[in-house]
Amino acid sequence: MSEENSITLEKFISTKDITILQAMQKIDVNTRSILYIVEDDGVLVASISDGDIRRWILKSGDVNDNVMMAAYKTPRFLYENEADKCNFLMNSAHITSIPILDKENKIVNIIFRDKSKADYIEAADLALSDTPIIIMAGGKGTRLYPYTKILPKPLIPVGDIPILERIMNRFHEYGARKFYLTVNYKKEMIKSYFAEQKVPYEIEYVEEDKPLGTAGSIRLIQEKFERPVIVTNCDILIDADYDSIIRHHIASENGITIVSSLKNFPIPYGVLDAEKEGLVTAIREKPHLSYFVNTGMYVVNPACFNMIPPDVMYHMTDLADDLMKSGGRVGMYPISEMSFLDMGEFQEMKRMEDRISEVL
């Protein structure tokens, strides 16, 4: 195995002494949604995907548990003399990679499926064809001032394309055909921009006369929806399988599903664990705290919209709180930290541009 190939493989391989959180971080870096787990001597023992991690989290699993708690312990593989079977196996099994092993069961290569040559059409192509998409684009974008003194936040470019257009294009890749844009601040600029574009989807504008919050303007939509609706902010991109999000929402029988992202916050000090009378029981040097945060993307059952009070400031978080208080189900769909791209603040815009250039 060449030195260059060895360096490349390191991105997709880890020993089994890491945590699930560390596996998530490695998967974020390699951008291929997979990590292969090996013994200390390099023998393949398991694989873990972002889907495996998500299922573990949804079972209330701790991301600080050992990676083997969530890993798939019978991963598919081929030996070097079988490498010509890779495309057939990946397409027939609907998987995106195959590790190639030597006679000692050590990984010497990893073959990734070329989507352009797949033998089947992915369900994602039409997954959102009948799903309404509501994008909340009426805010002033005060965190991005002074940019938003000139442009409304939805038209601020990420690379050479406005963030709002990128969001709609991403949904359109999954078949979305109808968008509702709730607009207020500099709404004529938004409408003028899209009037000049030849976008392959329909846009209906929902115009606020006054700020109504991230949910209040939804009451202004005249159409009565008959299936779950996606509601999202206009300053985020979610690099995830939208088909999987919808299917999880329906299977979980949630009223609202919040797409959540794991955020890690390093503590730059040694942290003391103590009992009564100040007895120190442990010292943890510069630990990381992990929390699931609200990304600003939701899947909502149409009946929930009836709970939104008319003509008052009301946010999506208010709707989720009220649904929980009434006994309804509010669930989450977890994604990794790097799958949540937020341009709401200046320091995040460069990270969003870098990530878009890699995977979107």
Image (spheres, rainbow, N blue to C red):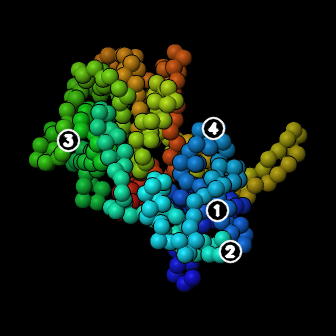
Badge 3 vs badge 1, beta-carbon distance below 8 Å: no
Task: Report how far apart the C-alphas of labels 1 and 4 lie in the structure.
Answer: 22 Å
Residue to which mark 1 is pinned: 37
* Amino acid type, callout 4: Lys
Local crowd size for mark 1, using a 10 Å CA cut-off: few (<14), some (14–19), many (≥20): many
The tally of labels here is 4
* Amino acid type, callout 2: Glu
Asked if 170 appears above or below 37 in the picture, the reply is above
* Amino acid type, callout 3: Tyr
Measured as percent of width and height from the top left, residue 105 is found at: 66, 71
* Amino acid type, callout 1: Ile
Q: Is tag 2's residue or tag 3's residue first in the polypeptide sequence?
A: 2
- Please give the name of the residue rendered at 25% of the width and 51% of the height, measured from the top-left corner: 162
**Residue 104, label in figure:** 2
Residue to which mark 3 is pinned: 201
- Please give the name of the residue rendered at 23% of the width and 20% of the height, measured from the top-left corner: 222
Secondary element at tag 1: strand
Q: Nearer the viewer, residue 264 or 78?
A: 78
Measured as percent of width and height from the top left, residue 337 is found at: 51, 51
Task: Report how far apart the C-alphas of labels 3 and 1 lie in the structure.
Answer: 43 Å
Q: Is tag 3's residue or tag 1's residue first in the polypeptide sequence?
A: 1
Task: Report how far apart the C-alphas of labels 1 and 2 lie in the structure.
Answer: 15 Å
Secondary element at tag 2: loop
Badge 1 vs badge 2, beta-carbon distance below 8 Å: no
Q: Quadrant of residue 174?
A: top left
Measured as percent of width and height from the top left, residue 165 is found at: 25, 48
Q: Nearer the viewer, residue 218 or 330?
A: 330
